[in-house]
Image (spheres, rainbow, N blue to C red):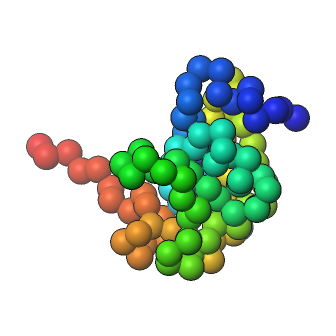
Amino acid sequence: MFEVKDLFQKSELIPVIVQDVADGEVLMLGFANEEAVRLTIETKTAWFWSRSREKLWNKGESSGNFLYVEEIFTDCDTDTLLLKCRPAGPTCHTGSRSCFFRKWEDEE
């Protein structure tokens, strides 16, 4: 077990990886501050800190495509979270299931 404050010893924001609990597919990467982590734990839905809008946001608040948190893991350094979630619809704002749908192609 870890305490939320332990996550923020190096930075005010930490990376948060979201994975589908059913099949392990990586759905998105976001950033969270301490308040977002606490809200995630309390509500069992994924909360993040929007670096562009500089505000908290609950994934799905406008689209209805919430990420329901089933399990939370931290990495060995206690500075990154992995949320295993049950998505209620597409995760990406483009409508794609995952934000990782663009394959890198070398231009040779």
The furthest residue to the front:
55
Q: Which residue is nearer to you in this view: 105 or 53?
A: 53
Q: Is residue 54 something that shows in the picture?
A: yes
Horizontal and vertical percent position of residue 1: 88, 35
Picture quadrant of residue 40: bottom right
Query: Residue 78's spot in the image, x, y percent?
Result: 70, 28
Name the residue furthest left: 108
Q: Residue at x 42, y 58 (%)?
A: 100
Question: Left or right: where does residue 53 sit relative to residue 13?
Answer: left
Up/down of 19 relative to 75, above or below: below
User: As drawn, is 74 to the left or to the right of 79?
Assistant: right
The reply to whether residue 82 is in sight is no
Q: Which picture quadrant has residue 64?
A: bottom right
Q: Nearer the viewer, residue 100 or 71?
A: 71
What x and y, as percent, mark residue 28?
51, 56
Name the residue located 29 percent from the left edge and 50 percent from the top edge.
104
Foreground residue among 52 and 82: 52
Residue at 36% from the left image edge and 48% from the top image edge? 52
Q: Residue at x 74, y 30 (%)?
A: 5
- Please determine whether, in this image, residue 39 is positioned above or below residue 33: below
Task: Give the side of residue 54 with respect to residue 84, left or right.
Answer: left
**In the visual, does 48 lie left or right of 72?**
left
Quadrant into which the C terminus falls: top left
Give how far across and how far down residue 22 sits, in percent.
71, 67
Please count the marks in the image: 0
